[in-house]
Amino acid sequence: MTTDFAYLNAIGTAVPPHDVHDAFITWANRRVEERARPLFARMAARAGIAHRWSVLPGVDGASAVDPGGFYAAAMPGTAARMAVYAREAPELALAAVAALQERVGLDGITHLVVASCTGFVAPGIDQIVAARLGLPADVERLLVGFMGCYAAIVALRSARHIVRSDPAARVLVVTVELSSLHLQDDTAVEPLLAMLQFGDGAAAALVTADARGMALGQPFAANLPDSADLIRWAITDTGFAMHLDGAVPGRIGTALGEPAFVATITGGTTPADLFWAVHAGGRSILDAVQSALSLPADALAASRAVLADNGNMSSATLMFVLARLLADPPQARAGVALAFGPGLAAEGLALRFAT
């Protein structure tokens, strides 16, 4: 037996307790060349971010970049960073699952899909989470690794495929990212502004055939031509170095200016008639999407709120946006989930509220 429908029933979210955004700005401002400080300050103020959270504590209430903190003396090696990931990523993921359990029962989980791109550990996060939750040994697991900001779409799409092929399936989807483990020893404005975007967070969701929440509709995927080098990660001896090119928003805007591409992601519906769950990759990216699609002023309010409160949490970010939309449904009943990431690739899903 199969079904045509899979539903995102509920989402729980979690962030760690340490707000590092202001401390990072102070740290970065000391490092950037003096003549570039006005530019950095201006761009930081325009970022649309008020808070970013980290699993890394400081000493006596200070941050990880202050004396005694993780980054105080020198940039730690990748092994030290991965040791923190192995310890802290499962804890944050389980906090998100606990938040989900406040909204929906998690009995009878048959599948576990986990997305993460900010660390590696084996046994994997999927196995650790499954064991800590006491899931049965025969639960089917899928780990979506190193796909970056659009990995939430890939995880939800996978859950959709599972439920549509087996209506009795109950799929737990988890996204967890510890981006703050990858601070780099840079002094140039562009990489510092890229690092200024990222924070830690986790989300957990239940996907089933029960008509509750949002129906997960037709997925879509596309690589934007001539853009492969615009977003990329490099694994270095001192963590994962993110490259986020300043040309990304313009390239996204160009793609969304192409009628055929817009028709692919909207199914031919006028964009302004849909609700939008857009990955909050940065203010300039949200501005590019809003401008290119001629969306109303408040169309991306949920994405901008997540950016302000949390920054870019890579794969977890879109889940936070969807959680806000579930909690405060927009007037439109049909919508689109859209995320951009390494490649430069776009991934998404059609959405529709169940009631």
Image: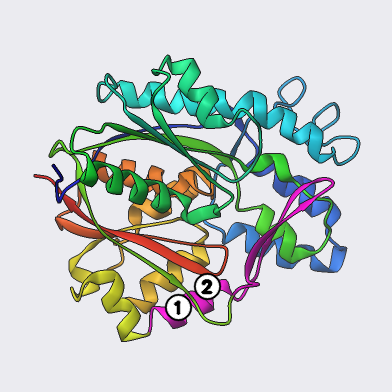
Residue nearest the observer in this picture, 267 or 184? 267
**Residue 292 belongs to magenta span:** no
Q: What stretch is highlighted in magenta?
A: 228-257
Q: Which residue is drawn at 31% across and 25% down?
A: 109
Asked if residue 328 shows in the view, the reply is no
- Horizontal and vertical percent position of residue 279: 43, 56
Q: Which mark is residue 343?
A: none
Give how far apart the Cα atoms at labels 1 and 2 are. Answer: 6 Å
- Where 115 falls versus 149 (above or below)? above
For the N terminus, the image quarter is: top left
Q: Residue at x 8, y 44 (%)?
A: 355
The part of the image, by quadrant, that contains residue 32 is bottom right
**Residue on which the image places disc 2:** 249
Check whether the beta carbons of the residues at disc 1 and disc 2 lie within 8 A of each other: yes
The part of the image, by quadrant, that contains residue 134 is top left
Q: How crowded is mark 1: few (under 14 residues within 10 Å), some or many (20 or more)?
A: some
The amino acid at mark 1 is Gly
The amino acid at mark 2 is Pro
